[in-house]
Image (cartoon, coloured by chain):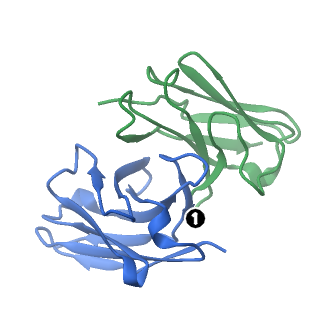
Amino acid sequence: SYELTQPPSVSVSPGQTARITCSGDALPKQYAYWYQQKPGQAPVMVIYKDSERPSGIPERFSGSSSGTTVTLTISGVQAEDEADYYCQSADSSGTYVVFGGGTKLTVL
Amino acid sequence: QVQLVQSGAEVKKPGASVKVSCRASGYTFTTYGMHWVRQAPGQRLEWMGWINAGNGNTEYSQKLQGRVTITRDTSASTAYMELSSLRFEDTAVYYCARDFPYSTGSLDPWGQGTLVTVSS
């Protein structure tokens, strides 16, 4: 079955830039989405269609795509950004939704 | 605003079935699909399937095909997820999430989650 690969963890100091990657063979063909999940809460979408930001999401969240890798960038990281981040896409047929393994962002 | 409210926590024995509901408000229910996602303790998000709330068509993950059934009641603006032949490893928080209007196949917003515990 199709898989999306994320690093298990990323650590940054407040004010720095965090970059979280997600790799998958079908990413050149399918859009990627990013979700933020804080402990005990439901996920919240922070990026859709590779690089679009939903209403209400701070501008410091951005997304990009290059080949089989997509990247979530958080500029000027704040303590409140500490969370698990999941990428999501679809298999090459577009039929099945797939999530990455998640990346724990730690703000030092 | 769009809101998804799920039913309460459940405790089930192995082999039993569980049915979780998701009541939608703040939009026309039949316009958008509804996804179901689960998360075992400390684990990743796992997509279970989705339903086109307009025509009732469904798609299920290959892993859960045969054990999961997603339905909807348009008069009640409610989607349901039933999982049968429960196993200990089905213990998880189960979420419903609306298909995102700006990009089908993505999920926003999400319900608050329903904890299903499988225990003997």
Q: Is A3 placed above or below B10 here?
A: above
Whether residue B72 can be seen here: yes
Left or right, A61 with reference to B14: right
Location of the C terminus of chain B (image quadrant): bottom left
Q: Secondary structure at mark 1?
A: loop
Q: Is residue A7 left or right of residue A97?
A: right
Q: Residue furthest top?
A: A67
The residue lying at 38 percent from left, 83 percent from top is B75
Q: Position of residue A23 (x, y in %)?
A: 51, 24
Q: Find residue A37 and report its image quarter.
A: bottom right
Q: Position of residue B20 (x, y in %)?
A: 33, 74
Chain B painted colour? blue
Residue B63 on image: x %, y %? 22, 45
Looking at the image, which residue is at 71% across and 51% down? A54
Closer-to-camera residue (A65/B90): A65
Residue B10's place in the image compared with B99, above or below, is: below
Q: How many marks?
A: 1
Mark 1 nearby-residue class (10 Å; few <14, some 14–19, many ≥20): few
Quarter placement of the N terminus of chain B? bottom right
Q: Is residue B8 visible?
A: no
Q: Is residue B54 left or right of residue A103?
A: left
Q: Considering depth in this image, is B50 or B66 the residue closer to the camera? A: B50
Q: Residue at x 57, y 73 (%)?
A: B27
Judging by the rendered image, the residue that carries numbered circle 1 is A41
Q: Which chain is green?
A: A
Q: Position of residue B110 (x, y in %)?
A: 53, 63
Name the residue located 38 percent from the left edge and 32 percent from the top edge.
A91
Q: Mark 1 falls within which chain? A: A
Amino acid type, label 1: Gln
